[in-house]
Image (cartoon, grey):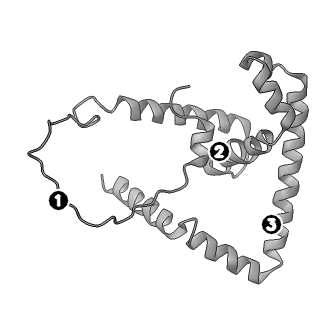
């Protein structure tokens, strides 16, 4: 694949803008440089990424059934299971020592994947149980979501994008 992959999907959670003060911008100095993506037809990379994302979502939809969002599916495979597999020293050694094809055919890969799925289930059950049974923990989680994880900003951005799309 090109520039878009499961790791990218799973790691793009938010962005942050910071005010670094004001500075003078002298447009008369230097030479003009055409900015990419502003001319007609320059949207090809974004369109290609969108097509790849659609392809990934279609593959995930073929894997899972039930009332699961695209975010649930992408997060589960691209973040949770991938991170569990990345923790494996055995897989790290095999990846370093073999081609992609050899690694994909490794008999140990399926076993480590099975272990990763079980570990992820255990971890999510433990975390969810703690959160459901502890009001103080839920309060602190919400503080993190609103602070470090920019929940409000993300919701506002989605609402703006949704309203903008329905206005078009």
Q: Nearer the viewer, residue 158 or 28?
A: 28
Mark 3 — residue? 128
The Cα atoms of the two marked residues, 2 and 1, are separated by 43 Å
Q: What element carries label 3?
A: helix
Outermost residue to the front: 29
Q: What element carries label 2?
A: helix
* Classed neighbour count for the residue bearing mark 3: other residues with Cα under 10 Å, few (<14), some (14–19), many (≥20): few
Disc 2 to disc 1: CB gap under 8 Å: no
Q: Residue at the location (56% across, 73% down)? A: 146
Mark 2 — residue? 74
Q: Residue 24 carries which label?
A: 1
Q: How many labels does the image show?
A: 3
Left or right: residue 18 versus residue 80 is: left
Which is more N-terminal, label 1 or label 2?
A: 1
The N terminus, quarter of image: top right
Which is more N-terminal, label 1 or label 3?
A: 1
The Cα atoms of the two marked residues, 3 and 2, are separated by 19 Å
């Amino acid at each position: 694949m090109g520039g878009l992959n499961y790791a990218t999907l799973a790691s793009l959670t938010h962005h942050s803008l910071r005010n670094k003060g004001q500075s003078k911008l002298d447009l008369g100095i230097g030479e003009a440089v055409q900015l990419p993506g502003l001319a007609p037809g320059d949207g090809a990379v974004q369109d290609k990424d969108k097509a790849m994302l659609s392809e990934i979502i279609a593959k995930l939809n073929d894997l899972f059934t039930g009332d699961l969002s695209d975010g649930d599916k992408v997060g589960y495979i691209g973040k949770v299971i991938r991170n569990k597999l990345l923790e494996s020293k055995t897989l790290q050694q095999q990846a370093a020592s073999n081609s992609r094809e050899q690694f994909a055919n490794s008999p140990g890969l399926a076993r480590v994947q099975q272990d990763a799925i079980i570990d992820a289930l255990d971890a999510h059950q433990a975390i969810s149980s703690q959160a459901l049974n502890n009001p103080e923990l839920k309060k602190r989680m919400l503080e993190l979501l609103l602070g470090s994880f920019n929940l409000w900003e993300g919701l506002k951005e989605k609402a703006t994008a949704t309203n903008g799309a329905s206005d078009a």
